[in-house]
Image: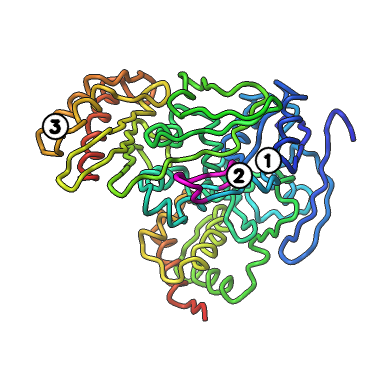
Amino acid sequence: MSQQNPTTTVTATINDSEIDATVPSRYLLSDLLRRELDITSVKRGCETGKCGACTVLMDGDPVKSCSVLAAQADGTGIETIEGLDDELGEIIKNAYSRNHGLQCGFCTSGFLLSTKSLLEDVSDPSRDEIRERLQGNICRCTGYTRIIEAVEDAAVRYDPE
Amino acid sequence: MKPITYLEPETVDEACEQLDRHGHDAVVLAGGQSLLQILKRRLVQADYVVDITAIDDLHELGKSDESFRIGAAVPYVDIVQHPVARSQIPGLAEAIETIGDHQIRCRGTFVGGIAHADPQGDPPIIATALDAEFHIASVDGTRTVSASEFYAGLFETDLNQGELITHVEVPLSEDNEISTYQSFTRRMGDYAIAAVALSTSLSNDETMTDPRVVVGAATHGPTRLSSVEDSLDDSVLTDDIIDEAAETARENVDATDDEVATAAYKSHLVGELTRDALESVR
C-alpha cells in the first residue's frame, strides 16, 4: 500500500453487475461511479451534499454519492438510473417526460432515483409527502411544479401489486 | 479530500485501540454527512478515518430498561420510524425530522450529531432537553456523561482524544411526560437560526413539573434557560404563564450575533419558539 495515497478494495453490486475495484481510500462513491466505472449519469453538482444531483440508491435508500466514501459502499447494492429499467423505473421516466418534469436534465437522475425510493415506500403520496421526500434534490429550471406533477402521475400509474 | 487510510474495526475495543494509536490523526466516521464535508473542505485534517459502522453492537436501537438506547451507527431514519421514539419521545422525532433532507437522514446518525457538537445542530439541543446520557468508551474503559455536562461552548465538548461515544440513552418518560422541539430556519433543511426544546411532566390539569427548557442555535451550544424553567415549574399552562415564559426567554437568552441574524432578532425568535413549544404541549 502506498503511504502517499492508501487504497481500498470495494466489492459491490452496481445495477445488477458485480464490481471489484481498488481505488484511493479518499475516493467518494461519486468518484468510484464516475471515474472508475464511467457511470456519468451520476452528476456532480455542488459536492457539498446540498444539491442531490449525485443521488443514487444504496441498498434501496437514496444517498448523496458525494457524501459517502467509496469504501463505505463495500458490500452494498448500488442503483443508478442505468438500472431504472424495471416497470416502476419505466413508469417514472415516462411520467417525467410526459409532464415536462425536466428541462436541462442535470438534476434529473437524482430526481428519478429519489422518486423511485419514495414510490417504493409510499405508493400514493400526498403533495406534502412528495415535497418532503424531494427536498434534498435541487432543480434550477422547472420551478418544481412539473416535477411534482410527474411524481403524482407516476403514482397514479404505478400499482405495487 | 487529502489521502486517508480507511479503517473498519469490528469491535468497540478494536476501534478504541485504533483511536488511541493514531491520536490526533484519527477521526471517527459513522454516517459521514458532516464529517465528509469538513474533510473535503479541509476544515479537519485526518490521516486515519475509523468507520465504526461495521461494529454490530453500535446498531442497537430500542428500549433498554427505563431508557431508549440509540447506538452510534443508527441512522436518523430508523429512529423516527421506531414506535417507542414516536409515541414516547415526540420531541426527539420532531427534532430529527427538521435535520437536512431525506438522503441525509438515511445516512446521518444521531450520535454523530451529538459528537460533532455543531452549535446549530439539532441533536445536542434535544438531547440536553431530554436529559440524555452519553456512553463513552476508550482504551481506559467506559464512562457516562449527561448531555448538560457534555457541551462546553462553541464546538467544545467533554470528549477526549481517543474516546468514542458508543450509544446515547434517553430516559423514557412516564405517562404524563411530554417533549417538543421547535426551530426556525429560513428554508427547509437549513441549519436553525434558533431552536427551543422542551421536556416536562404535565398533569391532567396542565400543571408542569420539572420542566427543562433548552435553547440552541442562537447560542454557543445548548443552554438551559433556568429563569424560564423556574417561572413554569408548578404552574398551570395558562395564556398568562405562556406570555410570561416567552418574555422571560427573550430577555434572558444570551444570543450570538452573526452574519445570518442579529442577537436581538434571535432573542425575539427564542421568545416566540418558547411560546410555540408551550402551546404545542398544551
Q: Amino acid at mark 1?
A: Ile
Q: How many C-alpha atoms fall within 10 Å of the one at disc 2: few (<14), some, or many (≥20)?
A: many
Residue B243, numbered label: 3
Instruction: Tell me whether circle 2 and circle 1 mark residues in contact (CB < 8 Å).
Output: yes
Quadrant for the C terminus of chain B, please.
top left
Q: Which residue is mark 1?
A: B52
Q: Identify the subunit bearing mark 2.
A: B
Q: Which of the two labelled residues, at mark 3 and mark 1, occupies the earlier sequence position? A: 1
In-image side of B144 versus B245 (left or right): right
Q: Secondary structure at mark 1?
A: loop
Q: Amino acid at mark 2?
A: Ala
Q: Secondary structure at mark 3?
A: helix
Q: Which of the two labelled residues, at mark 2 and mark 3, occupies the earlier sequence position? A: 2
Where does residue B125 sit, x and y in percent of width and height?
Answer: 40, 32
Inter-mark Cα distance, 2 to 3: 41 Å
Inter-mark Cα distance, 2 to 1: 7 Å
Please indicate, yes or no, whether residue B199 appears anywhere in the rendered image.
Answer: yes
Where does residue B134 sit, x and y in percent of width and height?
Answer: 52, 33
Closest to the observer, B105 or B28: B28
Q: Which residues are magenta?
A: B62-74
- In reply to whether residue B68 is colored magenta, the answer given is yes
Quadrant for the N terminus of chain B, please.
top right
In-image side of B188 versus A158 (left or right): left
Residue B107, numbered label: none
Q: Secondary structure at mark 2?
A: loop
Q: How many C-alpha atoms fall within 10 Å of the one at disc 3: few (<14), some, or many (≥20)?
A: some
Q: How is the image coloured?
A: rainbow
- What residue lies at 10% left-to-right and 38% top-to-bottom? B239
- In reply to whether residue B193 is colored magenta, the answer given is no
